[in-house]
Image: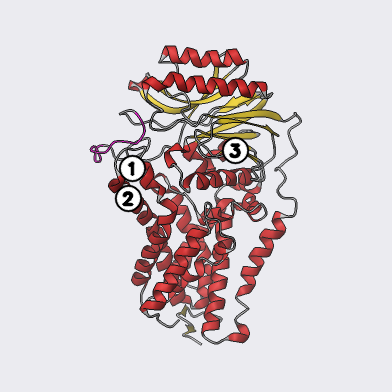
Amino acid sequence: MNRRGPAALFLTGSLFVLTYALGTPGYDVPGLPFVTLAPFLALAVSARSARQAAWRGWIAGTAASVPLYYWIAYTVAVPGKLGWALGSLAAFLVSAYVGAYLSVAAAAAHRLESRFGERGLWLFPFVWIAVEMARSYLFTGFPWMLLGYTLAGSATLRQAADLAGVHGLSFLLALSGVSVYLAGRRLSDRFRPVAAIPLIPGIAVILFLVLYGRSGSANPAGSAAPVPEVKVAIAQGGIDQSVKWNPGNQSATLRIYGELTQKARDAGAQVVVWPETAAPFFYGWETELSRRLEAIAVRGGIPILFGAPWYDPAGGGKFYNSVFQMDARGVVLARYDKRHLVPFGEYIPLRPVLFFLSKLTEGEGNFSTGTSPALFRIGGQPVAASICYEALFPALIREGVLEGATWLVNVTNDAWFGDTVAPLQHLAMARMRCVEFRRPMVRAANSGISAVIDADGGADAFLGLFRRGVLVAGVRPATGETVYAKTGEIFGISCSILAILAFIFPLRGSHGIRIDGRENIGA
């Protein structure tokens, strides 16, 4: 491909930044996810070397990530109370970190093209998934807004997630991007008669997603459980994060949730779900507040799932971010401790080295990680709970589904995000878990967005940002296992292995001679 001048390079980079960012949840410009990797490939392949491609990928990837993660500045500056300078630096560093993965993808794309010619770029979707897998697992993982999530808002296009998860959707979008790039490349090289040929895989991707999404695959993985639907209520307190942990405000918080719980019972709810740390005290240890909470369940005569911090004195004393199941008698039946914590939010990684940093949440000590999934029994059905950030990790949700959960509960405190794009992104990622496993989800957020999500990812029942109220809706338990539930990350792992092998074992031509560059040097 011809080397690009500064103006063309800038325009290509800008096109990638705009299409990549604006296609994500919260911006939701339709169609962009199918073409966004075309300008990215143009940046990478037109570089003079893999190193230059890596720099281009990092700069473009960082710039494209800023609109996705700018909310980190607010989180650190306002509820974290660390100032806008440090908040802006944190947002940039996270964007730069994500940009590093795109840098690897760009260098790999350049190597594929230089080694195998344009046909080598058809291997790029495997590389893209390998990079996403690394991002999902390295350093505890940060899979926020992977490419596949750009389809979360489409009732039709997201349905194929039950085959290979969000990585499967990312693969198809990467394939579409390669298709568009190669077609555009042939047009620019004046190969007009054959320019449309590379578009065939891209068109096939769209047709597959549309046909699969409309084929009835959106039904739950198995027949509905032979029990009536459960009428569930979400109590969204809308408690301001700046006063939530104020000792003088704790009683008022419980009074608010008590009133919302009464409204839920009057609306016929069988169980009420409160958000993450809706009870802003250590339940069971702060006796007076704990008794008030129990009295709410007894007075309402209704079971409650509520989030609260928990202290376990065993082993020298550990703190947990937990969700409790309390019956109508005010007796706690079960507890789930959060297993995937937020770095710097709930604990400081490498604490001996980063001793000068403090976490954003209340309290001096680090939270500890839970050890196992916990299934609650509600209406005779097993329910799997997750807390906040855990909705980003399908492996955690999968464990509950494989243990028999027929519906899901996610409690979160998105008040940290303020009025930014982050609550919309967080909701979109939770919706994808429902599609992957064909399980409905009750999502309770402190300040929104709370929702009851169907097994196909649809969410007709919402409580928006900064609203206080009760949301009551029916949840129909679902059974059976999707392909993704059965196979887990086999697809992502397979893509990663194939991507590695593509660089270890070069392709060979019909004469058994390695294909190097754009020509078969042995022909």
Residue 196 versus residue 249 in the image, above or below? below
Label at residue 451: 3
Residues at badges 2 and 1 in contact (C-beta under 8 Å)? yes
If you read the primary sequence from the N terminus, does the residue marked by circle 2 or circle 3 appear first?
A: 2
Determine which quarter of the picture holds residue 302: top right
Q: Position of residue 402 (x, y in %)?
A: 61, 37
Q: Which residue is mark 1?
A: 77
- The crowding category of the residue bearing disc 2, from other C-alpha atoms within 10 Å (few below 14, some 14 to 19, many at least 20), is some
Residue drawn at 45 percent across, 47 percent down: 420
- The crowding category of the residue bearing disc 3, from other C-alpha atoms within 10 Å (few below 14, some 14 to 19, many at least 20), is many
Q: Is residue 248 magenta?
A: no
Q: How is the image coloured?
A: secondary structure
Residue drawn at 33 percent across, 52 percent down: 93
If you read the primary sequence from the N terminus, does the residue marked by circle 2 or circle 1 appear first?
A: 1
Q: Specify the quadrant that holds the N terminus.
A: bottom left
Tell me which amino acid carries mark 2: Ser
